[in-house]
Amino acid sequence: MDLFSPVTALAGIGPSRAKQLAGLGIESIYDLIAYFPRTYEDRTRLVAISQLEPEQPACFEAMVIRAPQTSHIRKGLSLTKLTVADETAKLNLVYFNQPYTAEQLRYGESYIFYGALTGDYARYQMQNPSFESPNQPGVVTRRIMPVYSLTAGISNKLLSRCVHQALDACLDTLPDLLPQWVQAQYGLCSVREAYAGIHEPASFECLEAARKRLIFEEFFLFSAGLQLLRSRRTQAAAEPCGDLELTPFYAALPFSLTGAQQRAIGEIAADLGGSTPMNRLLQGDVGSGKTMVAAAAVYLAVKNHRQAAFMAPTEILAGQHFQSLSRLFAALDLPCALLTGSTPAAEKRRIKEGLADGSIPFVVGTHALLTGDVAFRNLGLVIADEQHRFGVAQRATLAGKGRSPHLLVMSATPIPRTLALIVYGDLNVSVLDELPPGRQTVDTFLVGESMRPRINAFIRKQAQAGHQVYVVCPAVEESETESLKSAEVWADALQRAVFPELRVGLLHGKLRPAEKEQVMGAFARHDLDLLVATTVIEVGVDVPNATLMVIENADRFGLSQLHQLRGRVGRGKDKSYCVLFTDNRNPDTLARLKALCKTNDGFQIAEEDMALRGPGDFFGSRQHGLPQFKAASLTQDVGLLKQAREAAETALADPDYVRDPSFPALQARIQVLFRDAETTLN
Ligand code: ADP
Ligand code: MG
């Protein structure tokens, strides 16, 4: 049995329990010990009965002064009552359907209980409190209780027991991934103390030390993983591009580029002309014209006999890019192909052959480009659009199909520079801080429920004028089903009760990719007038005929996210509008939302958002393309991230460390951390 053995290797965990655990993403013994509690209950303090607060669970010691008596209320419901007391007060305890448990409580004996008062003042009672003898070590009382996220069939008690077993089985052999000097220098506890302390903390100090160590370790792994990925890429030099002439490209464009676009293209051209592979982030507000900057890079790469690959996060986006780019490149006599999951098999084969023999110099695609059987003759440029949707490792996988290709990642989410540096390392940044001329601003209104009839009339008017409308409902982070339901229920209500004459569609994250594509396709073809959606439409969708964006519960979104959503309209020639619904009366919230009505400048909004909410929004969402951290938070633990990155850099720079026997264990854990990113990091 080792750390990565399946949970069934533990005594008492059979196939059916393993299946339940798998529902929590727990498959190996390591997964169990790395399944950290969601929160903790402080059961360390004993209070007097008279000090108990209603609805606030607490521990107290009391003697049974009236023995348990069970009555059967009706079939299937029994009630066991008893009374306990300490020197301050008496208290009635009630157990439902637990006659055996309750009758373990013996008259005249004292126990430690844990529970919360319910009922009215003067008639307080306590239902189903846990208890144990004061002579036993505390299991459910007098300790800090871990509280785990659970799934059907698994109780907190059961999960705690499984974790305890896993700890027993592997704690002694747990490899220490952090070099000794790192632990000493940064004041970290041992790996044993960390895992024991996070699950079964003896004190809040132990818990804090455990958390610090685990966060540090996770960031260390993360930083080391990124560095290993990066060093694989940058070790080899790129062959400089000699021909950087762009005149024919400019001549083929239907418009002249903005100053910002030209500046960014200049920076990219300089990178391509050098021998260090480009590693550049192109940041630009929604509609700032990032695609054309990417096109210039593709043009230069192909002109210099390299192949280029352009990866988009969805089929819809890939299709849109392909459409606009293939038109442009046709004028330049530069063939290009579209490769996605739904490309027909024969076509796929033809494209793969063309990429392998080099006859197709440029491909636009989705994750389909990442599969093992896609090979390039000479991949020299990799572009990832909407970079926050891709895992770091996914980009690396694509880049790995070439020899040190140039890398350009694009994002409409302005990332604070300090965080970008930490996460992306030596990334260079180009900024498009200017919109193409003639772009109109989207008029934005903040309204309350009282405006509902007028807004509905406005929606109808837009639709009658032949335009389309988005209605976005909030995705509730904690509960996917809740958000799903709200969009679903809302779409249904709008279709039936409000707009029976309009064609209403529904788009949410729970749909399968093919279904999503289908709904988006229908909206793009104007087969739908109104699209009710969760934030899945946030990224890059381009339907110029959509002129109105209505956002429900706008206070539930971050400003940058609202700005992204608003960017879905105002993409055509028609005047466009954004309506933010909220009934929130909090002055801070309203001030935040009003900022959005005042400006259309995404960077200004991002700064405002940062000032108001901290950097959380940028990396807080699930769509950041970074590993899922178990202990760490990129928002709250930036200080530790800096230290861990520094430590990882120093460690990896030491050739002895890489030869250290603990190094394979480190690599194995990096694999696990990046597991979702579908790649290997040897
Ligand atoms: P984003 O930065 O959001 O990806 P796009 O690249 O999709 O923006 O560009 C948005 C729209 O603006 C596209 O229709 C594109 O053709 C157009 N566009 C890009 N650059 C210019 C320009 N310099 N002048 C006019 N229109 C432009
Ligand atoms: Mg774009």
Image (tube, helix red, strand yellow):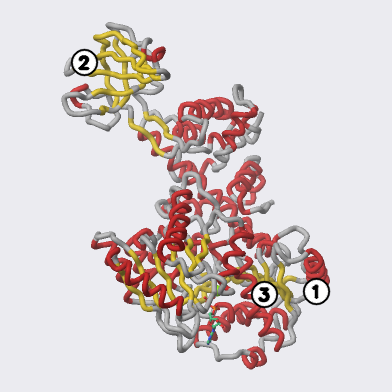
Residue 552's spot in the image, x, y percent? Answer: 38, 62
Marker count (numbered): 3
Ligand 2 shows up in which quadrant of the image?
Answer: bottom right
- Image height check: is 56 above or below 49? below
Q: Residue at x 75, y 58 (%)?
A: 372
Count neighbours of disc 1 (C-alpha within 10 A) and say few if under 14, some if 14 to 19, many if 20 or more.
Answer: some
| Residue matched to label 1 | 358
Residue 146 to residue 131: above or below: below
Label 2 is placed on what type of residue? Asp
> Residue 275 appears at what percent x and percent y?
67, 75
Q: Are marks 1 and 3 in contact (CB under 8 Å)?
A: no
Position of the N terminus, as image quadrant, is top right
Report the Cα–Cα distance between label 3 and label 2: 80 Å
Q: CA distance from mark 1 to mark 3?
A: 22 Å
Which amino acid type is shown beneath numbered disc 3?
Ser
Q: Earlier in the sequence, mark 1 or mark 3?
A: 3
Q: Which residue is mark 2?
A: 86
Q: Position of residue 12 (x, y in %)?
A: 59, 22
